[in-house]
Image (tube, rainbow, N blue to C red):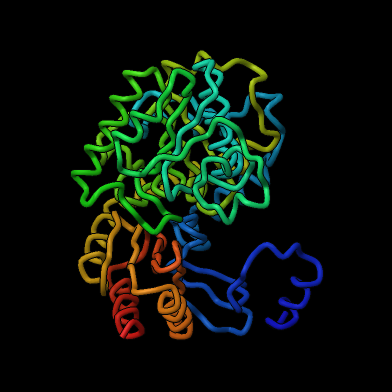
């Protein structure tokens, strides 16, 4: 189909929830994608950090094809070999011994974390951070500090509090005897690629303070690694670089190479507080999704893509124009205002580079982990030109 026909059918038959960019992508290979009119682009969005291997990676395609020919879905009424293999892999890569709950998205993973925290502690209160994003389902929405998303759906989940990101004293004051969990992002992705404090070391100290507060108060520390996980920041989980062991880690986006999957990883020492029937997901951890995740993780580890993320990311942040920040291949360039950020995104697309804008004035780049230094260099040169 040509673009105008696709757009017309979208408007006629799809609930209009998305402010879509004016192109329709129809094919991808490696770091590049093609639209319905035949134009090609270097993809620096990667499905919003969801395609760490890029597009149509042969190992991922083969794993999905072979598994689809064997067994796609059976439900969690049965034991699933691919699921237990994946759970062991994630345990081996995690900063603590974990048990996994499989679902289909980051919002679902955070919903499970809310329920698990309440069940384990027998408390109800949840604390999250200013400028946070944890999802748009009713529980995760209550701990997403975006008023424009919340307003139409109030009243939200009760006993949810928002405190200033980076302020340990404000957090201490907010914790009460009914607090079950603290939710925190190590780097706020939708919030503009933001660290809680001025630099990496100060941010490490902040997360250490949260860990100590949770231990002192008997509160669950939930680290949302939906965007920072799966090798994006240069380690499989960013928790490793920040030197912390959470009680629960949530992960999604890139975990299955672009195939829908979310995972809630619970410290094995407290997972016994969760009982059969407390939660479930019909499609969570189905054989096809797990096969995709196994192939994705094996490729990230086996092909040195975390090292590539560190190397190319360090180069990109050092060479990016303006006020750049990030870790690994999670990069934000802050520009003067919302209008200029939007203009830069449009001009980059016209030049054949896909970026997006988050937090109104931050140009975000979360490319596939296979991106080369040369490809990133071309993107940065063009970004510098359009910002001028």
Residue 72 x/y as whole percent: 68, 41
Where on the picture, by quarter, is residue 5? bottom right
Looking at the image, residue 93 sits to the left or right of residue 264; the answer is left
Residue at left 35%, top 26%? 96
- Residue 302 showing in the rendered view: yes
Circle count? 0
Question: Is residue 245 toward the left or the right of residue 204 in the image?
Answer: right
* 119 vs 251: above or below: above
Residue 361 at x, y percent in the picture? 40, 69
- Residue nearest the observer in this picture, 54 or 206: 206
Q: Position of residue 280 (x, y in %)?
A: 66, 28
Q: Which quadrant would residue 171 be assigned to in this image?
A: top left
Q: Can residue 89 be seen in this view?
A: no
Tell me which residue sits at (44%, 73%) in the image: 338
In the image, is 295 to the left or to the right of 287? left
Vertical arrangement, residue 38 with respect to residue 198, above or below:
below
Query: In the picture shown, does residue 353 fall above or below 288?
Result: below
Quadrant for the N terminus in the image? bottom right
Quadrant, the C terminus: bottom left
In the rendered image, the residue lying farthest to the right is 12
In the foreground, 184 or 304: 184
Give the answer, above or below, for where 206 lies relative to 116. below
Q: Which of 320 and 329 is in front in this view?
A: 320
Looking at the picture, how far across and down is residue 71, in whole percent?
Answer: 68, 39
Q: For the point 63% across and 51% down, which residue is it?
A: 151
């Amino acid at each position: 189909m040509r673009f105008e026909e696709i757009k017309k059918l979208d408007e006629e038959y799809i609930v209009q929830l998305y402010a879509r960019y004016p192109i329709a992508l129809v094919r991808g290979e490696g770091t590049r994608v093609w639209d319905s009119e035949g134009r090609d682009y270097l993809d620096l969005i990667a499905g919003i950090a969801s395609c760490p291997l890029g597009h149509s990676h042969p190992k991922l395609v083969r794993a999905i094809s072979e598994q689809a020919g064997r067994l796609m879905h059976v439900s969690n009424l049965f034991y699933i070999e691919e699921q237990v293999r994946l759970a062991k892999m994630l345990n081996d890569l995690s900063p603590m011994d974990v048990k996994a709950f499989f679902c289909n998205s980051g919002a679902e993973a955070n919903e499970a974390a809310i329920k698990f925290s309440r069940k384990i502690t027998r408390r109800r209160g949840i604390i999250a951070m200013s400028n946070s994003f944890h999802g748009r389902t009713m529980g995760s929405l209550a701990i997403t500090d975006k008023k424009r998303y919340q307003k139409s759906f109030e009243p939200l989940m009760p006993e949810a509090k928002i405190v200033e990101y980076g302020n340990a004293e404000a957090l201490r004051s907010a914790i009460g005897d009914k607090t079950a969990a603290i939710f925190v992002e190590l780097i706020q992705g939708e919030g503009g690629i933001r660290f809680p404090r001025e630099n990496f070391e100060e941010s490490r100290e902040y997360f250490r303070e949260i860990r100590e507060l949770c231990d002192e108060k008997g509160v669950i520390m939930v680290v949302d690694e939906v965007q920072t996980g799966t090798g994006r920041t240069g380690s499989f989980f960013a928790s490793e670089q920040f030197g912390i062991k959470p009680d629960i880690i949530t992960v999604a986006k890139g975990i299955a190479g672009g195939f829908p999957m979310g995972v809630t990883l619970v410290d094995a020492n407290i997972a016994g507080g969760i009982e059969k029937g407390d939660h479930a997901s019909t499609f969570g951890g189905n054989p096809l999704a797990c096969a995709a995740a196994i192939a994705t993780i094996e490729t990230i580890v086996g092909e040195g893509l975390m090292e590539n993320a560190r190397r190319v990311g360090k180069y990109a942040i050092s060479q990016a124009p303006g006020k750049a920040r990030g870790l690994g291949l999670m990069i934000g360039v802050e520009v003067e205002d919302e209008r200029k950020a939007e203009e830069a995104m449009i001009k980059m697309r016209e030049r054949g580079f896909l970026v997006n804008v988050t937090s109104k004035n931050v140009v975000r780049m979360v490319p596939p982990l296979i991106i080369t230094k040369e490809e990133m260099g071309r993107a940065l040169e063009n970004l510098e030109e359009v910002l001028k």
